[in-house]
Image: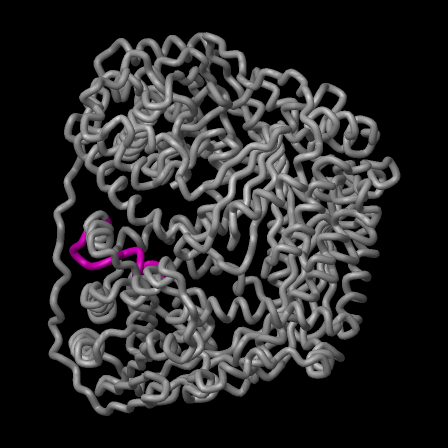
Amino acid sequence: MMSFSLACLRRRAAALAVVSCMATATAHAASATTATSDAAVTELTTTQIEQALAWDKRVVRGELANGLRYFLLDSRTLPGASKHQLQINLLVDAGALDEEEDQLGVAHMVEHMVFHDSSGLPQGARAALVALGLRQGQEFNAVTNAEMTRYMLTLKQPTSERTAALLQVLEQMAFHANLRQAQLDEERRVIKEEWRGKLGLRQRINDQKKALLRSGSRYVDRPVIGTEDSIDQTPASLLQRFYADWYAPNNMALVAMGPMDPAALAGLISRQFGEVPARTLPARHPRDPQLHDQLQLRAISDKESSTHQLVALLRFPELAGGELTAVRQRLVAYLARDLMTEQIRRQQSELPEGVKSLSVTKGEVSDHVGILGFAVSVEPDGYQQGLRALLTEINRLQQHGIYADDFARAKEKVRKTAENNIEAAQQRGDLWLVKLVDAVSRQRPLADAELSNRLSLSLIDSITLAEVNQQLRRWLNAEDRMLYTQAAGGAEVSLPAPAAIQQLWRQLGQQPLPALQPYQPVTARQMPEPRLPRGQLLSQQDSPDLGMTEWRFANGDSLVRIRPDHFRQRYPRELSEAQVSLEESLHERLYFKAVSSAGFNQPGRDPWLPQLAGKVAINSGLQGWSKSQLRLWEQTRQVGLSIEQQPQQLSFSATISNERLPDLLAYYHQLQSQPWLDPQVVSETRDNLLKQITAPVRQPLQQFSLALGKARAGEEDALQPSLSLVRELNAQQLQQSWQAQLRVPVRYYVATDMADEQLLALALRYLASVPRDASAAYATAVAGTVAGEQRLELAINSEPQAWYNLRADMAMAWSPERAVQIAALGQLLQDKLKQQLREQVQGIYRLESELTLTPPSLLLNADGRQQAASDPGRLRLSLRFSSDPARIDQLAQMSQQVLHTLPAAITPEWLARQQSQFDEAERSRLGTGVAATLLHRLQLSEEQFGNASYLYTMDRLPRSFDQQALRQLASGWQWDSWVEGVLRPDPRAGVN
């Protein structure tokens, strides 16, 4: 179902964890008519209320004499947070909205330029950060938006000396950047490519939406990145003026999280940042839009659009109040938003012919102005029906309001969420930094999760249905209204004049409308017990040195379990009290994977039929169960099962608590032993595919991607199902295909510390009893690519933008050590490409590159064991970037030169950094991630070597970083398949 999005608007999280986890709350919202009564908070003392509204005590806060504020969080006290890196964020309270009329895009340009030279760093901040071991894009980056500029730095393995050096660089960026004209002339080429990289349908549509949603405000006329002209022509003097105006210590906040002594770090900050004096800041421009009591009719139009949609926008002022009142009102607003969204979802059944879906979204236009967006997705000739349906449902909601029983359920949901958040907040890990930065940037305390959620629990009972309906009707009564259409291909849509629409709106509001769809309770179901007899165990093999047991069953299936705790003892670590608590909770987690060779690439058969069969089967659920019943069962049992199909493999996987294993296996057993394809799902799948295949491909990038895929695969049917297959698709075909896949024997992998007896009993009951046929013929083949070199050029882009795309692969023997080496070489390749194409020649802004070594494809023997196929493995390369059309060929050649000279970049310094990064990642993989790591490596080992030898040799992985071996590995690659593609502007469209 298509839904309307307010993604182009800023979304604000609420101060309290209960609200932030459930909704985007209204900013500073409170109502004088719903003031908090004393009885609302009788469960908490005055001191407890004050603490619930104050900063979490773990956050060490301070303010220097010059006004710079700092917020420090010691990650050693936080379960799951990184203990080996210090993350520092500098927040500058200035963005595009603070620019003057002649400074379009200047805030963003300054963000780029402060990485160049300063009074104390003649070689530039970028070079200084790299010298400290930070990589651009990974360990240092920056972002500018309409309201703020943020600099993000991450220091691995911090020491006091390295931390002091990092703060020195940051202080130079903040206060002493030179912003020279010559360097701006170079950097503007990179900025231009950042602007160019955003061009396309999505950006054009978002720009048009922003102009409508935020009409009457500075947001519309202040694109953060600027315009092509402003990027090309803005002089350095305008950047210097903005920098002098806004880069003042009293307009900044420094946020840090990592292993630290907060008092010592506060001292470093004071010494490094305390000497720059405070400055008087310029007056800020108003940010809120001017609201008008009128209906406007607008259209979003683009010839590449494939959407048919009608949207009603309602804008209104948000209410303001004191802290405690605002907390209560945010709960009221959350309830109103949540209940409204659920009610609109129910109204889908009321939609007339030609109207496909209905949705509503609540967001913010600015600090003090909110917005509702109601949208209907329609057929090309369904706009008139969509208009009436849209206005009918808005008025119906306004007339009838929220049902009392819905309100009671929603309040109970808030209570449960608040209670769950108290526990969940203890496992935030590195999300602490996200929440801390969000709180600082919004100038709200990051409250103690337990206290703030207990405050919400004390407030929720005092909230009445009348208050929620009053809030809802205040939104729906907003007089600042807009209707806009968006038609595929940019087609014109004929709607009545605004006055006629207003009259229809009023008429529908004045006449009695039928009641809203009531809540339909879902009848809880119990998972059926297996109808088939208990399976038989053929053999058991124990490997005590690996903590591993294998069971083989009479139906051809087999299960191998591995005990994560065995490896926790093998790789002991020093843990803090918080980490011990986290580790103990992970002991109760279970990782499950079921793998067979029922892939989709069968010789002589359409590869799409097995894929569609699996998709329909999973979407069909269980026979006799509604989707709501199955969803309720999954939610209450906390069980989910995902499916993935590859050319030569079909797998099901899940991560659950140990106690939920009986539920998971019972569910899996039903899917396997009682396969069912819902006729309605079959019909919907066929109809959707027909629309997808027959729809015109309007977007140039989509056409380019399809052409490249066809060149690599050699046939169009490899990219999407053929029209003939979809037209003839029926339930019998799909059922036969799915049953054939389910007959193939399965290998189960389970990582858990559960007792053998308990696990085996469940496996015999639910897994060994599933009917299989080891003799069934289910042959698959490698999904190959067309051999040789190919070059594809298309001149169809509607933007002044060119794209280069390279895909290549070759045979290469796989091993764990080599896979580690290729991953390191892939990171080196990406770093060198960025260094050459962006930093040295300013030709690109962003690129995507990937170098991977995939294991051999698999075949299945009659005994159900997976063995390596004849293909030894594949080295795969992909590269993609956009640039100025005049430079695309030169940059493509440069990228290939970087690839050829990669061995020379393998230096001892680079090897040392890679070794350190790998060791840190491996500690995490064998720490909190040990169960998932073991499961993955065990599966790889069995598939490639026919045994568990990888688990014996994991200690060798850190020795993979040998300079000679890596240089030899990176030399003389002979690609079997090499496909280059270039997308250029369409000369007929006057684009160059």
Measured as percent of width and height from the top left, residue 633 is found at 20, 53
Does the magenta portion include 621?
yes
Measured as percent of width and height from the top left, residue 45 is found at 23, 28
Residue drawn 39% across and 67% down?
610
Q: Is residue 168 above or below residue 606?
A: above
Q: Is residue 673 above or below residue 281?
A: below
Q: Quadrant of the N terminus?
A: top left
Q: Determine the image quadrant of residue 536.
A: bottom left
Residue 849 in the figure: left or right of residue 716: right
Residue 260 in the figure: left or right of residue 902: left
Say whether residue 88 is visible: yes
Residue 633 in the figure: left or right of residue 277: left
Measured as percent of width and height from the top left, residue 832 is found at 74, 62
Of the pair 156 and 404, the residue shown nearer to us: 156
Q: Which residues are magenta?
A: 615-627
Q: Which residue sits furthest right?
A: 182
Residue 786 in the figure: left or right of residue 572: right
Q: Is residue 617 above or below residue 195?
A: below
Residue drawn 82% across and 54% down?
840
Measured as percent of width and height from the top left, residue 370 is found at 44, 22
Of the pair 444 and 976, the residue shown nearer to us: 444
Residue drawn 20% across and 65% down?
659
Q: Determine the image quadrant of residue 816.
A: bottom right
Say whether residue 340 is visible: no
Does the magenta portion include 587?
no
Count of number-bearing discs: 0
Q: Quadrant of the C terminus?
A: top right
